[in-house]
């Protein structure tokens, strides 16, 4: 599903080149939950951004379901992301003035809304936040926020879920619930690439990749 | 969330202030115009009606009484004329002919050249007024010719004033000597109670010879001018065109003079109203000039304000935009979201501004006395200006929000997410 082939990335920080990834390859198959661990600055987030079609690598290739998102224009790549990739972030990044339902429905703005409302209702029910459906993020617990973010990530039925420290801001119980849902997504045939510091979270993955700083 | 709402509210407020300012100013201008139109136009209508009425009355009176006009020689002192009872200066006799032949003369119908002078009737040792006349000059225009009312004295004849014949025991048909010339008394005048009672009328030529003023006259009399359009001003104007420099004395009945005063009063009233209208027009121009300065300032201020707020809004929502871009929203979609927001800001601000500005304008107009009846309020609002405000405000708002919105739509989600 996700095939990262020898990608390299160097950042220019204050006029100084800082290499982060050097010919790094990674493959996540459908139904596989892969966790990436490593110290800060080792390139975990860069892998995630590159895998999500958000950050073009300096060299190498990223293929999602056999297609190279970087071969597409910016606008087409945005549509590609909306169709194939779901994102979950440590900070949840919900739109603060939208309620749970509208936050979950946000990706439908990109892909059209046919059946989106039913799908959102199903996800909200599945993630146990039906009673919070009319609440804005500020009125939700952190666990509820992350479940809302997860529901949003899955609205368009992506084949790839990219998670950046999804339990980083959650207590143990809430984190476990979220990880179970991610696990469930992988078990249902989705590919998951999760970046985490948390060993317990990584323990839920089928495979853990440890990255070292270059 | 609070900032987003505050930003929206402040942007709406910016549009509202600009739209309200413009609408209030146009409302005030229209109120001013309406007031000018209502009371000056009403007063002017009334004054014109009144002028027509008094002019009509004046025509009737002038037709009834007419004018008597005396044309005196150029340079004649009126003080001397009134003191002596005749003009000391003279003019050519053909001046009367020139007057009678003129196409310009339309008001006068009876015209006679006169030579009048105080002399001593040496044979009787009496001071008399000698009046030489040869009757009326026939007017060139036949249709204005009327039956002569100024008498003609045949050669060798005289008419004698009441006091003279009465005191000297003279009779009609009697021969008398006057300055060595033999005359027959044609007529003894009835008592007039004026200078005429000590006057003797002779043929003009004889009078000129006796006073050594051959070919000269010192007065042209125009009597009984009854043209409906005649008035002293018009008569003076006509005469001064034909005989520049000549002194013109117009005498009429008190009723005619009073009617003339009423006409002049009414003409003055109209002039006063016209002056007030002109004054209000000047004041209006002043307000227009003020508006010409404030309107662009209001629009430019609002545009800058909205632009800054749009920039602040984009900056504040950087993460949100990055996330929306990350989950698949295209740059065009993001751009449209921000532009639609700007359009809504412009529309809401304009509608609120129109309402507030209209109410404010009407209230100020009422306070300034420009609006006196509630029923006039509807006329204060210009549908065109309101339509322009409601249409242009959203467009302007979207235009000035365009650069920040484009910047938002081009944000790189990877940069935003990396930063977070």
Image (cartoon, coloured by chain):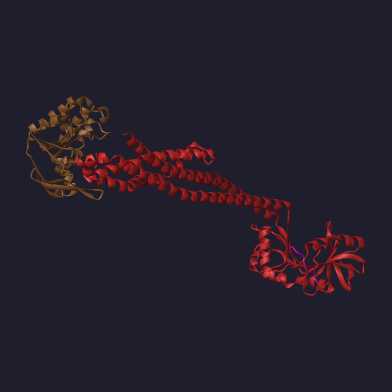
Q: Is residue B390 visible?
A: no
Residue B207 left/right relative to A41:
right
Q: Nearer the viewer, residue B223 or B403?
A: B403
Position in image of residue B129 (x %, y %): 85, 65
Q: Which residue lies at the image location 47% right of the left edge and 50% below the top edge?
A: B293
Q: Is residue B152 magenta?
A: yes
Q: In the image, which residues are magenta? A: B149-155
Question: Taking B101 as reference, is B338 above or below it?
Answer: above
Please tell me in which quadrant of the rendered image residue B216 appears. Answer: bottom right
Please tell me in which quadrant of the rendered image residue B420 appears. Answer: top left
Residue B107 left/right relative to B19:
right
Q: Which residue lies at the image location 25% right of the left edge and 45% below the top edge?
A: B411
Q: Nearer the viewer, residue B8 or B233?
A: B8
Q: Which chain is brown?
A: A
Q: How many marks?
A: 0
Residue A152 left/right relative to B11:
left
Please tell me in which quadrant of the rendered image residue B169 appears. Answer: bottom right
Position in image of residue A106 (x %, y %): 21, 37
Position in image of residue B88 (x %, y %): 81, 67
Q: Is residue B91 magenta?
A: no
Q: Nearer the viewer, residue A30 or B23?
A: A30
Residue B8 left/right relative to B325:
right
SS majority, magenta: loop
The N terminus of chain B sits in image quarter: top left
Q: Is residue B162 visible?
A: yes
Q: Colour of chain B?
A: red
Question: Taking A178 as reference, is B15 above or below it?
Answer: below
Position in image of residue A77 (x %, y %): 16, 46
Q: Which residue lies at the image location 54% right of the left edge and 40% below the top edge?
A: B368
């Amino acid at each position: 599903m996700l095939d990262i082939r020898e990608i390299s990335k160097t950042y220019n920080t204050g006029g100084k080149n800082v290499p982060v990834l050097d010919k790094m390859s990674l493959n996540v198959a459908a139904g596989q939950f892969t966790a990436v661990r490593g110290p800060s600055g080792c390139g975990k987030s860069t892998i995630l951004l590159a895998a999500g079609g958000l950050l073009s690598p300096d060299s190498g290739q990223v293929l999602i379901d056999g297609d190279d998102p970087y071969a597409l224009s910016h606008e087409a790549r945005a549509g590609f992301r909306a169709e194939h990739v779901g994102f979950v972030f440590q900070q949840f990044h919900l739109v603060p003035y939208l309620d749970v339902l509208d936050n979950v429905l946000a990706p439908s703005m990109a892909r059209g809304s046919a059946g989106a409302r039913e799908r959102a209702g199903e996800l909200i029910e599945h993630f146990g936040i039906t009673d919070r459906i009319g609440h804005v993020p500020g009125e939700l617990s952190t666990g509820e926020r992350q479940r809302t973010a997860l529901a949003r990530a899955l609205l368009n039925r992506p084949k790839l879920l990219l998670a950046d420290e999804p339990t980083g801001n959650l207590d143990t119980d809430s984190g476990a619930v979220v990880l179970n849902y991610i696990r469930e997504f992988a078990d249902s045939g989705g590919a998951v690439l999760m970046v985490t510091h948390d060993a317990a979270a990584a323990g839920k993955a089928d495979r853990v990749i440890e990255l070292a700083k270059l | 969330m609070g900032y987003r709402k505050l930003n929206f509210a402040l942007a709406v407020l910016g549009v509202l202030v600009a739209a309200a300012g413009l609408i209030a100013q146009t409302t005030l201008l229209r109120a001013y115009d309406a007031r000018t139109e209502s009371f000056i136009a009403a007063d002017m209508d009334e004054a014109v009606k009144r002028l027509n009425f008094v002019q009509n009355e004046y025509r009737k009176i002038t037709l009834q009484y007419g004018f008597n006009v005396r044309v005196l020689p150029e340079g004649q002192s009126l003080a001397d004329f009134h003191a002596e009872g005749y003009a000391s200066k003279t003019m050519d006799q053909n001046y009367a002919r020139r007057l009678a032949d003129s196409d310009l003369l339309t008001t006068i119908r009876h015209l006679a050249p006169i030579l009048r002078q105080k002399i001593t009737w040496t044979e009787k040792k009496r001071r008399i007024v000698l009046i030489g006349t040869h009757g009326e000059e026939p007017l060139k225009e036949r249709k204005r010719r009327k039956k002569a009312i100024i008498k003609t004295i045949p050669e060798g004849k005289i008419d004698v004033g009441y006091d003279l014949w009465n005191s000297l025991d003279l009779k009609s048909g009697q021969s008398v000597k006057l300055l060595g010339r033999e005359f027959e008394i044609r007529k003894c005048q009835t008592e007039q109670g004026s200078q005429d009672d000590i006057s003797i009328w002779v043929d003009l030529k004889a009078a000129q010879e006796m006073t050594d003023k051959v070919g000269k006259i010192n007065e042209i009399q125009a009597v009984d001018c009854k043209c409906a359009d005649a008035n002293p001003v018009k008569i003076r104007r006509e005469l001064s065109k034909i005989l520049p420099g000549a002194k013109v004395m117009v005498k009429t009945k008190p009723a005619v003079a009073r009617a003339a005063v009423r006409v002049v009063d009414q003409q003055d009233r109209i002039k006063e109203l016209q002056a007030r209208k002109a004054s209000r027009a000047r004041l209006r121009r002043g307000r227009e000039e003020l508006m010409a300065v404030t309107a662009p300032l209001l629009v430019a201020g609002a545009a800058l304000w909205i632009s800054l707020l749009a920039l602040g809004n984009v900056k504040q929502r950087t993460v949100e935009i990055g996330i929306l871009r990350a989950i698949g929203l295209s740059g065009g979609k993001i751009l449209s979201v921000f532009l639609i927001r700007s359009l809504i800001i412009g529309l809401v601000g304009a509608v609120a501004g129109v309402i507030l500005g209209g109410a404010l304008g009407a209230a100020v107009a009422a306070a300034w006395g420009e609006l006196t009846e509630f029923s006039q309020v509807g006329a204060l609002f210009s549908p065109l200006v309101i339509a322009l405000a409601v249409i242009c405000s959203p467009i302007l708002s979207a235009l000035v929000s365009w650069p920040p919105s484009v910047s938002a739509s081009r944000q790189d989600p990877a940069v935003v997410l990396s930063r977070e």
